[in-house]
Amino acid sequence: MATPEAEAAAGTVKVRGTSDRTTPEATAATTSTAGLLPATSSGRPAATGPGFSARLTAPLLLGSLLNPLNTTMISTALVAIGHTFGIGAADTAWLISVLYLASAVAQPVLGKLADALGPRRVFLAGLVVVIASGLVGTFAPGFGWLIASRLLLGIGTSAAYPAAMAVLRDESRRIGRATPRPVLARLSFAALGSAAIGPTLGGLLVMVVGWRGIFAVNVPVALIALGSALLWIPADPPRTRGADGRAPRVDLDPLGIGLFSTALTVLVFFLLDLAHPMWWLLAPFAALTGVLVWWQLRRPRPFIDLRMLASNAALARTYLRHGLSYLLIYCVMYGYTQWLEEVRGYSSGHTGLLMLPMSLAALVCSLLGARTKGIRGPLALACVLLTVGSGVLMFLSGSAPLAVLLLAGACFGIPQGLIGTSNQAAVQAYAPPESIGSAAGLQRTAQYIGAITASSLIALAYGRSASDSGLHLMAAVSVVLGLLLIVLTVTDRALRTRT
């Protein structure tokens, strides 16, 4: 049986229709195809073709790389955007937070819509929104238009990954066999790779065509994905109707979604001005959170399954560990790059090149992490390197040697590769098989909340512009969080089991 880490690298999910007795470690490649085979009139499986052609997967890969690419690509454009509109780091941090805020809510919602309405429809609609967001950002006359562009971008790009997984699930049903692991691996690697090369690509775009290229590049990529999807992704299968002939009801829990979105937005407004905290915002946040908890506990199919989280401590600790890890990673992705430009004096292009070793380390280690036999070892190593890297940042100054700058980036690139695959393996191992989809969505939400908090910490540390003292403050907080991560990892008994 394949290890959870190998499944994580392949982006494995449990295909609906398989037996509920499937173990958490079972992969789509090894899961029985019972319930997936197209039946003949006699009830026996029909003859099937090879399936999963390159034409089918090409648009899925293109669409799925847009969200992770845009989460990191803007990191080397923030300084240039701030100079254009005469604003500081505290304001440009909104460009980071608004995309994560939109993605944190949109990912699980659009995943449910893909299941209910059809993945092809949702995939195409998301790409149309991405094209619109790219045009808005490219021709934005003011900073507010950039905020709107990033909001649309977060919503549009969030459709691709859950819809892609649903397309592959439907293809599995059509041909009567589970999605091959190489297909899932390519989808997973597209997300990891695009996120890793984002800072370097962003820096080159800013250097060659200016910061508007960060937004404009989404248009041709989305257009290519849209055209290939229209040609090669088959039409959605007909929706199963009830005994009365009516289409099934789409149960999205709109009140739960609205309460979650509003509470998270209020929290973001509080976090983004920690230098002058608006303490009164904590009262509506607490009230909204209380109502959200009450409503989710009443719903038979809630937006967030709080009962499952309360009864599954190992999974809850995985979410906490994942969110804290990405808080530290994104502090470097955004805060360190701003410091390199504003204090060290590098251009956006040179900053992107300096971040290239971090990107390459993340790519290589994501593959190595998938080959390990356990979860605890890679996570412990990642937490130690995050702490060491944060410690290095505490002693940097504008005159630091180039080798030290590259070392600091590498210390964060290696954990980025190990954490993504290892925590996904933990979710696969600890989540209930029947809830693996929603559990994976909550892991993404934990990552987005960590990124939002990182942008808030950067805004607090830098204020109007990056500085040595601001970098050292951010690094000191990161060291404390890194030590907490080490404790959470080495004391987690659930991680000690070799899988």
Image: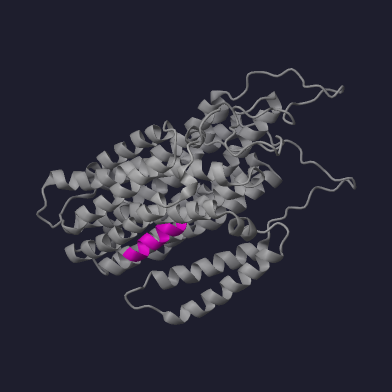
Image height check: is 13 above or below 485?
A: above
Q: In the rendering, at what x and y percent does residue 321 appear?
A: 43, 53
Please name whichever residue, 406 or 495, is drawn nearer the observer in this view of the structure: 495
Residue 190 falls in image quadrant? top left
**Is 321 on the left or on the right of 13, as rendered?**
left
Would residue 490 appear left or right of 16 to someone viewing this image? left
Q: Quadrant of residue 374?
A: top left
Task: Determine if the magenta segment contains residue 449.
Answer: yes
- Vertical relation: 4 (above or below) 493: above
User: Is residue 394 among the parts visible in the rendering?
Assistant: yes
Query: What's the residue at 57%, 23% (across, down)?
Result: 53
User: In the rendered image, which quarter is residue 302 located in?
Assistant: bottom right
Q: Residue at x 39, y 32 (%)?
A: 367
Q: Quick check: is 474 in the magenta stretch? A: no
Question: Is 118 displayed left or right of 91 in the figure?
Answer: right
Residue at 58 percent across and 28 percent down: it is 56
Q: Position of residue 101 (x, y in %)?
A: 48, 60
